[in-house]
Amino acid sequence: MRRVKPSSHCWPPTPTTRGNLDLATDIDLGQKKATDAINRLKGAKEVGTNPVLQLNLANAYLQGGQAREAAAILNRYTFNNKDDQNGWDLLAQAEAQLATAIRSWRRAPKALRWWAVSIRPFQCSAAPVRRLSSAACSRRATMRVSISCADCSSASSRTKRCNKGECTLWTDAVKIYHNPRCSKSRDTLSLLKSNGVDPEIVLYLDTPPDAQTIRQLLRMLDMGSARELMRQKEDLYKSLGLDNTRLSEDELVQAMVDNPKLIERPIVVANGKARIGRPAGTGA
């Protein structure tokens, strides 16, 4: 009987269903054939309307070393799918691959590079600019993109808008809870400014956040307990007995209000999300 030579994979050049395209992409990438995956997905009309295939194409570009093309897709994807963490994770990877995206990337210490990847989703300047009517501008929208307008002669740190009948979408201010005596906090502030971000600086040791603000930060950080936001290696933490597991969430929050030194730093807030500028629990 005639023997048939096995092919590298069993899919036709252009699979006809989303499931086939999805799996064919996985096979191509597993065989280090990113170019084949890119060409297949670019030729599939379903990519324009299917979020899964859009992520597949972006991932194929990443695997193929085409980070700029991946970032262009992912900026638009995260614009339309703000709650999909997969999109944000891939976007962070794409931006990290772009040497020009973070000018100090090669010189930055390892801990700072970790933070750089975390904050890149706050700055997606390649996203498309959408125009709104004056009436629509009265409803402030929460965006994940930083959009500049050529018609604006000046802009505040909080918003950018035109004086004409149309304006760009509002952008939320970036805020950093900063301790100038902390080297990691200084490095994070420097990194933000080097990437064109002029944040609102909150010297939280001088002006401690109230309980409501701390609870809001906990939500934006997606933390399950106030204890996660506390510097648990501080001597003050133990001397106040805060390691007592019987303490309520309200008591932990109030401890941070009364003793802001216990709050992990730095915290960067933008577009309804927050990040801590280093892994929690590390030393000063």
Image: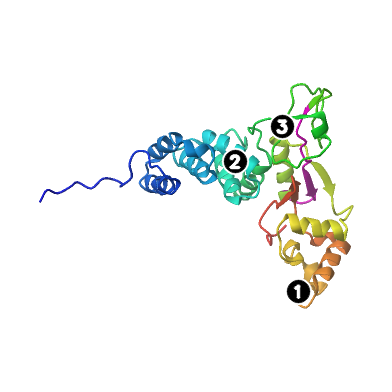
Q: Earlier in the sequence, mark 3 or mark 1?
A: 3
Q: Any mark on residue 77, and which?
A: 2
| In the displayed structure image, the side of residue 10 where residue 80 appears, left or right | right
In the depicted view, which residue is nearer to us: 265 or 209? 209
Query: Could you classify mark 3 by the number of other residues whose Cα lies within 10 Å: few (under 14), some (14-19), or many (20 or more)?
Result: many
Residue bearing mark 3: 147
- How far is disc 2 from disc 1 in space, using C-alphas? 42 Å
Residue bearing mark 1: 243
- Image quadrant in which you'd find residue 143: top right
- Image quadrant in which you'd find residue 246: bottom right
In the depicted view, which residue is nearer to us: 217 or 240? 217
> x, y (%) of residue 25?
41, 45
The magenta stretch is: 167-183
> x, y (%) of residue 254?
86, 66
Residue 264 in view here: no
**Contact (Cβ within 8 Å) of mark 2 with mark 3:** no
> x, y (%) of residue 59?
49, 43
| Residue under the point 84% across and 56% down | 213
- Image quadrant in which you'd find residue 223: bottom right
Helix, strand or loop at disc 3? Answer: loop
Instruction: Give the label, 3 or 1, closer to the camera.
Output: 3
When the figure is inspected, residue 39 is found, relative to residue 249, above or below; the finding is above
In the depicted view, which residue is nearer to us: 22 or 258? 22
Q: Amino acid at mark 3?
A: Ile
> x, y (%) of residue 110?
59, 49
In magenta stretch: residue 60: no
- How far is disc 3 from disc 1 in space, using C-alphas? 45 Å
| Residue under the point 84% across and 47% down | 202
| Residue under the point 33% across and 41% down | 12
Instruction: Give the label, 2 or 1, closer to the camera.
Output: 2
In magenta stretch: residue 177: yes
